[in-house]
Image: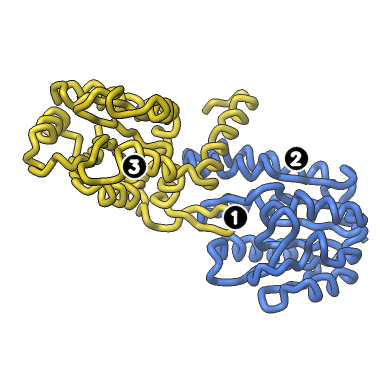
Amino acid sequence: MADILIAHNSNPYDPAHTFFDACYCRVRQLCVDYGLHYKSVTTEKLTEKEVMGAMPENHLCIVISHGDSYGIMNEEDEYYISTTTANYAFANKGLYAIACSCGQNMKEELMRIGLSLFIGYKDELRFLIDDQDFVDCAIEGVVALFRGKTLQEASEMMTHKYIDTIGKTDNFIKRILLEHNLNNLVTEGKPTITFCDLQ
Amino acid sequence: MEKYNLIFIDDSMTDGYMDAFVKTLAKEDPCAEPHIFINPEEGFDFIMANLNKRMIVMLDYRFEGNKINGLDILLKIREKTSLLYIILMSVNNILDIMTPNNIVELMNQDYVYFFNRNRDALDVIPLLTAIKKQWNSRFDCLLENWIVNQPEDKTKKILVFGKNAYSWEELLTELRLQSEVGKSFEKMINQFYISELNRGNNG
C-alpha cells in the first residue's frame, strides 16, 4: 500500500492554526485507521528540500498549509511546492491540498510535469474558527481515497459532504462559507485513478 | 427599530444638543442618537472610527472660514465607504453654491440626498424614513443587520479567509469600506443563493 507524506503548517500563532491542526489530526488518525504508513513534515522542516526529498518514497502528499495560485507556503511565506520549485518528484504521485488557491497555476504546472491526481481549491479556503464541519468537509476526499474510491468518486463524495453539511446547518454564514469552498473545489486526474494506482 | 447614529456635521450648530433642528429630529425619531460636530474633520474621524455602527450623516455644505466644503467631505467619506447614507444640507439654493460639475459629481454618488435647511426640520423625517426603509430591503443593509444581531462577542475572531481572521465587527467594517474582503463576502453570498436556486433548494 502506498505511503503518505503529510506536510503541515503547525505554527500556533497562525489564524488558521486550529483548522490546520484539526485537519492534521484527522488525516493522521485516518492513516492509522487504514493501516497506512505516513511521514509528517511540520513547521521547522517545511521546506522545498524536505518535501521534494521525501516524495520519491511516498505516493500521496497531503498538504495542510497556506497557499496561493502559485504555490503552497510555510509559515515564513516561502513556497515549498510552487510553479518554480523542482517538482519532478511529483510525477505519477498524488497531491491533496488543504490550502488556498493552489488549484490554479500550481496545479497546472504539477499536472504538466506528470502529477497523477490533484484535489485542492482554486480560491481562498474560508471557515469558521473551531468548527469541526469545515474539517470534515476538507478531509472527506482523504476518506474516499483511503477507502479505495476513484478520483471521480472522491470528488462526488466531497461534493455530497459539503451539500449535506450545508443542508444541516441553520448558521447562515457557515452555509455561505461551505458553499464557497465547495464552489472552489478542484479535482484533476484520470477519473478512474485510485490511491493504489499512485506510484 | 434599532438605534442608529445620526451624525450632524455643521459649523452653525454651536448650541450642540440644544440646537432646535437637532432637538426636533431627536424628538421625532427616538431611534436616532445624535452626535454633533462643528469641526468637519472631527466629524469625519468619528465616522471612520464607527463604521461598524449604523449611521446617517447630515452634512452641511458650507463651513465658514474653512477651505473645504460639504461635497469635499462627502467625497472623502466615499473614498472610505460607499454604503453610508449622507444627507447634504444647505440654507442656500443648490444652484447658488455648486457648479454644474459639482452637481453632476453629487448626482453620481450612491446613497446621497439633498435637504434645503430653509425648510421645516420635520421635512427631513421622510428622508430618514426612506433611508431606514432601505435598511430593511437592501441586500447589503440586511447583511449588516444580520451581523449586528449575531449573539457572539462581536470582537472575537470568528472566521478565517485565507491567511486572515476576522471578528463580526471587523467583517462589518470591511463590508462598509467595500474593501476587497467586503466585496468578496457579498459576492460569496450571491453565489450561495445562485447555487441554492440551481439545486432547487431554498431551505
How many discs mark residues in the rendered view?
A: 3
Earlier in the chain: of badge 3 and badge 1, it is 3
Q: Colour of chain B?
A: yellow
Residue B117 located left or right of residue A73: left
Q: Which chain, by letter, is blue?
A: A
Q: In this rendering, does residue B176 appear at all?
A: no
Query: Which residue is painted at 67% across and 63% down in the image?
Result: A65
Establish whether labels 1 and 2 are both on one chain. no
Residue A44 located left or right of residue B114: right
Find disc 2 in the rendering and name its residue.
A156
Identify the amino acid type marked 1.
Answer: Gly
**In the image, residue A60 lies at what x, y percent?**
83, 61
- Is B199 placed above or below A24 here? above
Query: Which residue is painted at 66% across and 67% down in the image?
Result: A77
Query: Which residue is painted at 52% across and 52% down in the image?
Result: A128
**In the image, residue B159 lies at what x, y percent?**
50, 53
Task: Mark 1: give few (<14), some (14-19) or many (20+) Cα within 10 Å.
Answer: many
Identify the amino acid type marked 2.
Answer: Glu
Spatial CA span between label 1 and label 2: 24 Å
**In the image, residue B106 lies at what x, y percent?**
39, 29
- Quarter-wise, where is residue A94 in the image? bottom right
Spatial CA span between label 3 and label 1: 34 Å
Query: Which label sits in the foreground, 2 or 3?
Result: 3
**Disc 1 to disc 2: CB gap under 8 Å:** no
Spatial CA span between label 2 and label 3: 53 Å
**Disc 2 to disc 3: CB gap under 8 Å:** no
